[in-house]
Image (spheres, helix red, strand yellow):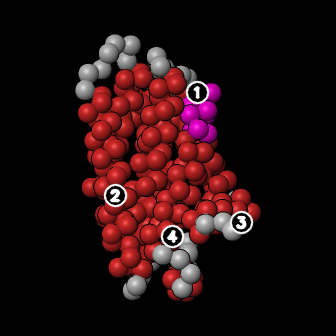
Amino acid sequence: MAQSPLISLVRKDLLIEWRQKHTLFGVLLYVGSTVFVVYMMSGQPEPKVWNALFWLTQLFVAVNSVAKSFLQEHPHRFRYYFTLIKPGTFLLAKMIYSIVLMLLMSLVSLLLYNVMLGWPLEQGLLFVAIASVGSLSLSTVFTFLSAIAARAQQNAALMAILGFPLVTPVLMILSNLALKAIAPVYQPGWWVLALSLLALDVLVVVLGLILFPFLWQE
């Protein structure tokens, strides 16, 4: 039984990542060195600072790994893909690949933070769940931005310009959601933040599926 184009594309990207490994090891080195420098400068920070540092680390991990999902593709290869698959399928495959990669990086970051910077969490499993949702959100947003930048003459500066207004609310929502796992008392209004984050993720995916076919034909 033949695989669907979506599964084949995701499998292809994962195999390439596993064989090359330079992006994977580069991000692991970045995360490890960042956590080590923070530990050497401040030891084990207080919970709110710990939370802020974690999400800043996830932001730069997304920039250095997920954001390159489209930019690493050669322009001529897009023409080849154009003859084989639909643009929406290609975009969704890149998003799924980015989500898997970002989830792995988030779990590694949590492990390193736990070892070096302590574990100031009242509800550890809840924070892991929020980190997973954050990985999904950041990877979706940066894959969408990478698709736009890749079709705009590989202009990475465009991704940075468009990314700031999109990523800032995502990080603010994730940071506030994570306070529920850190604070020992009940944090009201968390479900409103969760629904807002979900709505933003759905909006980014829908916009990508609408806009990418037009960029695909350029």
Give me the residue at 48% from left, 45% from top: 135
Q: Secondary structure at mark 3?
A: loop
Spatial CA span between label 3 and label 1: 44 Å
Q: Which residue is mark 2?
A: 204
Mark positioned earlier in the residue sequence (3 or 1): 3
Spatial CA span between label 1 and label 4: 36 Å
Do residues under tags 1 and 4 come within 8 Å of each other at their CB atoms?
no
* Amino acid identity at mark 1: Asn
Q: Which residue is mark 1?
A: 114
In the depicted view, which residue is nearer to us: 180 or 26?
180
The answer to which image quadrant residue 214 occupies is: bottom left
Question: Could you tell me residue 38's position as x and y percent?
Answer: 52, 35
The N terminus: image quadrant:
bottom right
* Amino acid identity at mark 3: Met
Q: Which residue is mark 4?
A: 90
Spatial CA span between label 1 and label 2: 32 Å
Numbered disc in front, either 3 or 1: 3
What is the span of residues highlighted in magenta in the rendered image? 107-115
Spatial CA span between label 2 and label 4: 15 Å
Q: Which numbered disc covers residue 105?
A: none
Mark positioned earlier in the residue sequence (4 or 3): 3
Does 103 sit left or right of 177 as displayed?
right
